[in-house]
Amino acid sequence: MNYTNLLLEKNGAVAVLTINRPKALNALNSDTLKELSAVLDELGSDSGVKAVIITGSGEKAFIAGADISQMKEFNAIEGRRFALLGHATFRKLELMPQPVIAAINGFALGGGCELAMACDIRMAGENAKFGQPEVTLGLTAGFGGTQRLPRLVGTGIASELLFTGDVIDAKEAHRIGLVNKVYPLDTLMEEALKLAKRISGRAPAAVQLSKSAIQRGMNMDIDSAQAYEAEVFGLTFSTQDQTEGCGAFLEKRKPVFEGK
Ligand code: CAA
């Protein structure tokens, strides 16, 4: 499939997805969200893809938010529809089988911060900047920011960021637990690929079931979540990779996982 606002590259079992609207600092308009939704369906059903990296085009921005020029003309119904499109698209990141890494190479504001928060792992370049500046535009966050930010950093810090619209740097984002680690920008993609490849070398079903247990379990009460974890754990014993992994450990050799 051809995309206008996205670039898709495969690097072995790793798919690298680049939001490609550099003139608008990769701002998300509805066409870009629809393309993103379609490509996530495509990647999610591709068993050859073991991990996905999302980044932004150019060196200035990951994603500078939802597209303000498009939103300026919205009425209430269109605004609601836009939020629902963002919600459905970002939820696909959480529910697709493969782990998704955000390689945040610059501004991650508004919808950009929200997209990063829907990824499983966030790696930031030293130049990255984060914030939910919607209140400075007379808006609230609309692509999940009021929900995912407090879940990630706690309600106090999330409230301060969502009420002020303040922008924070990568170091502060790391301090509050919004990103996993900060890297020099020129090594960010290399490090993201290294991590994605390390994950791709693990037993695919075990990785994907771990993701499912995290994403689904985090929204359940602890008893339901642990019951789900027990089902997931049990399911791994139906895979050849479990026999291989445990066998290789006992035979003191490296496992060779075949994704079966
Ligand atoms: N939407 C549309 N266009 C955008 C954009 C956005 N979110 N962010 C930047 N652009 C455009 C600018 O309009 C500009 O276009 P022109 O060259 O045609 O004028 C181009 O990208 C470059 O931007 P700047 O000249 O502003 O670049 P800068 O380096 O001076 O500033 C910036 C960078 C601080 C990121 C600044 O562009 C900015 O503040 N952008 C808006 C950030 C923002 O408020 N994001 C939240 C949007 S609301 C949202 O996301 C709602 C939601 O939750 C769903």
Image (tube, rainbow, N blue to C red):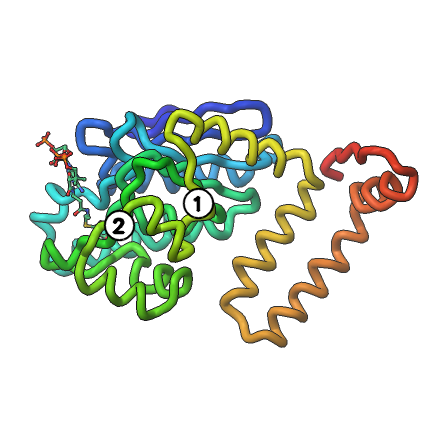
Residue positioned 80% across, 35% down in the render: 255
Farthest residue, direction right: 251
Displayed quadrant of residue 127: top left
The quadrant holding residue 224 is: bottom right
Quadrant showing the N terminus: top left
Q: Earlier in the sequence, mark 1 or mark 2?
A: 1
Count neighbours of disc 2 (C-alpha within 10 A) and say few if under 14, some if 14 to 19, many if 20 or more.
some
In the rendering, which numbered label is found on residue 168? 2
Q: Which mark is residue 229?
A: none
Looking at the rendered structure, the secondary structure element under dot 2 is strand
Does the Cβ of the disc 1 residue fall within 8 Å of ligand 1? no
For marks 1 and 2, give the one nearer the viewer. 2
Residue 122: numbered disc = 1
Residue type for callout 1: Arg
Residue under the point 67% across and 41% down: 204
- Going by the image, does 66 lie left or right of 149? left
Q: In which quarter of the image is ligand 1?
A: top left
**Residue at position x 75%, y 52% from top?**
236
> In x, y percent, where is residue 143?
29, 54
Type of amino acid at the residue the image marks with label 2: Ile
Q: What element carries label 1?
A: strand
Indicate the position of residue 180 as horizontal and vertical percent values.
46, 47
Marks 1 and 2, Cα distance to the nearest angstrom? 15 Å
Q: At 11% across and 55% down in the image, what residue appears?
A: 136
